[in-house]
Image (cartoon, rainbow, N blue to C red):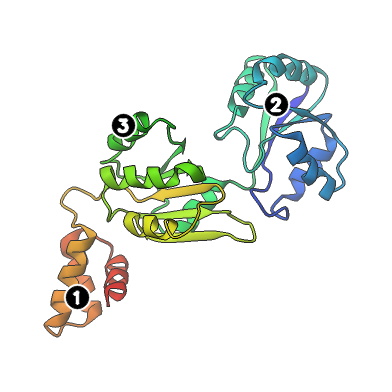
Amino acid sequence: MGTLYLVSTPIGNLEDITLRALRILREVDIIAAEDTRHTGKLLKRYEITTKLTSYHEHNKEAREAHLLDRLEGGDLALVSDAGTPGLSDPGFELVGAALERGYEVTSIPGPSAPIAALVASGLPTDSFIFLGYLPRKAGARRALIESLANERRTLVVFEVPHRIQKTLEDLIAFLGEDRLAAVGRELTKLHEEIIRGTLSELQAHISTGKPRGEYTLVLGGAPAPGKWTEHEVIEAVCARVDTGLSRSSAARQIAAESGWDRQEVYRLSLEER
């Protein structure tokens, strides 16, 4: 009885693959990939000759039984086009089916776009929610965003270029233009871009050019009850600095009163200056 290996592959830079992942891809009997042509380029780069087969959203039902049968006599590696399989792809269904049959399932950790964007965003990482792709239809997307307006945890979502502007409009409408956020584009690639600021600042930046590449949005959680808005924090700090108080002392005082972190208050005061 074989093992199903969930192998994380690069999200852009082909150097971002572990030695263990390369070994597993060489040793398994077959590799199931979303796009065999895409994965084929990775295998060619590292001179891996393991047989490839496709497994994606449009053929998953037809291929599932075949892949489970292959597990009966050997090991199988599952990879996505980029990152960790099972996140926003049909891989989780194959995992469930394999576990039901009693096969061993092992994760080979590595690149993950949600984690890469989250840790580089500058937003809280201690508790977060990954939502995958937001609904395509405007009504469903807005309903979901509205339901999350008071969510305190950091939110991470994927978005495609042709919907990014509409999504930012909806986020501003329900979360507010001052909600802190970050957007990562072309992560780990040559033209990687990570923009940090308020939702309105992100929208302004993206509107200056034609959206390209996959986007990962990281959204700050809702302020705690009674917590001041960013605008209120900036105004209060500036007012106290104008009275002669040092910027550091003003930031410390406002942090204690507003519910904001002192360093964040100080950063906002410097940007306003």
Q: Nearer the viewer, mark 3 or mark 2?
A: 3
In the picture, measured across the screen, residue 105 lies left or right of residue 269, that is right
In the picture, measured across the screen, residue 95 lies left or right of residue 14, that is left
The residue under label 3 is: 143
The residue under label 2 is: 55
Q: Decide: few, some or many residues near mark 3? Use Cα within 10 Å; few <14, some 14-19, many ≥20.
A: few
Residue furthest left in the image: 243
Q: Name the residue rendered at 19%, 72% in the picture.
A: 237
Question: Three-letter amino acid code at disc 1?
Answer: Ala
Q: Nearer the viewer, mark 3 or mark 1?
A: 3
In the picture, measured across the screen, residue 85 lies left or right of residue 180, that is right
Q: Name the residue rendered at 21%, 77% in the picture.
A: 249
Compared to residue 158, the image places residue 59 above or below, namely above
Q: Quadrant of residue 39?
A: top right
Compared to residue 43, the image places residue 229 above or below, namely below
Q: Is residue 191 visible?
A: yes
What number is the disc on residue 250?
1
Q: Nearer the viewer, residue 77 or 256?
A: 77
Residue 233 drawn at (x, y percent): 20, 65
Asked if the residue at tag 1 contacts the one at tag 3, i.e. Cβ–Cβ closer than 8 Å, the answer is no
Q: Nearer the viewer, residue 198 or 113?
A: 198
Residue 234 drawn at (x, y percent): 21, 68
Question: Three-letter amino acid code at disc 3?
Answer: Ala
